[in-house]
Image (cartoon, grey):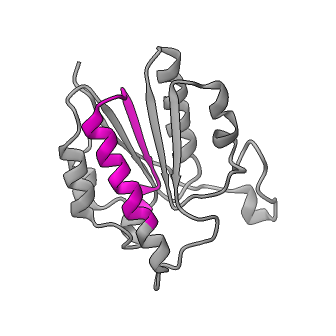
Amino acid sequence: MAGLILVYTGNGKGKTTAALGLSLRALGHNQRVGFLQFMKGSKNYGEIKITPVLPKLTLVQAGRESFVSYENPDPIDITMAQEGLALARQWLEEDNYDLIVLDEILVAVAFKLISVNQVLELVHKKPPHLDLVLTGRYAAAEIIEIADTVTEMTEIKHAYNQGVEAKAGMEF
């Protein structure tokens, strides 16, 4: 069966969570999952902490703990995103996964850490059987166009806006 390209985008909560849920489902079917997080570097995320008990899940972060400036990204943020892109390219060439998630890659594009064309080139190198998930706000029209499935998360209401702090296991 041919692999799909899925995009999880929008301003609402749940893009990474949906990609993690899909990854868990794939693992349940004995599939191999590569999960690459752009613009994230905290080791406090629940998905980082659980990887030791999920041997068929490879999770790598390509970012720092600090926020990236939209107007003026630090050169290290660009370098780390480009290194993440190189790793994604390597994963595609090695063809060792059934599912690859490129978490927050769409934000990395919006912040000009990587280009839309680089992502499109990457997608076109996808092995035919591989399912590929791209997540993050600000999905470019060109990426939406080539995707098989696009889901937009829309924020209706969020606890954070009512003063509730980020909760372990829920937000990270």
Q: Which of 164 and 93 is in front in this view?
A: 93
Q: Please report the residue visible at 47 percent of the width from the left and 14 percent of the height from the top.
A: 29
Q: Which span is picked out in magenta? A: 80-107
Q: Identify which residue is drawn at 18% across, 45% down.
A: 124
Percent x, y of residue 59? 53, 40
Q: Quadrant of the N terminus?
A: top left
Q: In the rendered image of this protein, does residue 131 appear above or below residue 68?
A: above
Point out residue 10 in the picture as x, y percentages from the top left corner.
46, 56
Say left or right for 164 vs 121: right
Residue 123 showing in the rendered view: yes
Q: Is residue 148 visible?
A: no
- At horizontal 64% and vertical 64% (from top left) the residue drawn is 65
Location of residue 130 with respect to 147 vertically, above or below: above
Residue 94 coordinates in the image, percent (x, y): 29, 34
Task: Determine whether 95 is above or below 106 in the image.
Answer: above
Q: Image check: 108 left or right of 25?
A: left
Residue 105 shown in magenta: yes
